[in-house]
Image (cartoon, grey):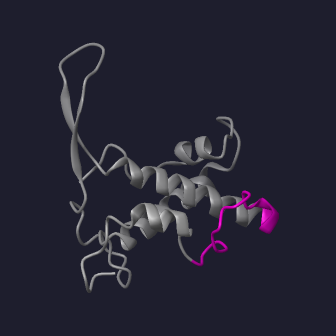
Amino acid sequence: MALANWPITAADLRKALSYGSTQGDEDELALYAKAVCEEIDAATGRRDRMTGELVNPTRWVITETVTPDVGDPYDVEVLPSIFVLAAREAAKLWWQQSFNGPKGQPEGAGGPPMGADLPSKVKGWLSKYPPVPGIS
């Protein structure tokens, strides 16, 4: 199932970092974007942590209507916007910590070092989207 807004891309992470279109290594940015989306999928019950398999791809998916400037409206399947915001925020923090060390962490970010976990504020944002018991 392809979602219109998930997973985030290298371009999304570039935007979160306020990078220009040629800043940052494309493959590295894409890796961080993918990793954070996998972690969020696991934290919200969409992915099994042990196998890495997407076990519930429709969990939390909603349908939104897109109204283009030209043409008829159409529906797209997406995850709630908070998932995208959480992914951008966590990936940005991981990137900054990995490439700039502790001084790269934004003031008051309150998150653990890269690889430890999702930042606490991201966990708070996603707390309304718990995993199914026994899946995470």
Q: Is residue 9 or residue 92 the one in the foreground?
A: 92
Residue for point 79% across, 67% down: 101
Q: Is residue 25 or residue 105 the one in the foreground?
A: 105
* Residue 17, image x, y percentages: 65, 46
* Residue 123, image x, y percentages: 47, 68
Query: Which quarter of the figure has residue 23?
Result: top right
* Residue 46, image x, y percentages: 29, 68
Query: Which quarter of the figure has residue 20?
Result: top right
Magenta span: chief secondary structure: loop
Magenta range: 100-116
Q: Is residue 111 or residue 136 the one in the foreground?
A: 111
* Residue 74, image x, y percentages: 18, 29
State the count of labels: 0
Q: Is residue 117 above or below residue 3?
A: below
Is there any visible trace of residue 118 in the rendered image?
A: yes
Is there any visible trace of residue 7 in the rendered image?
A: no
Residue for point 38% across, 47% down: 81
Magenta stretch contains residue 106: yes
Q: Is residue 2 left or right of residue 112?
A: left
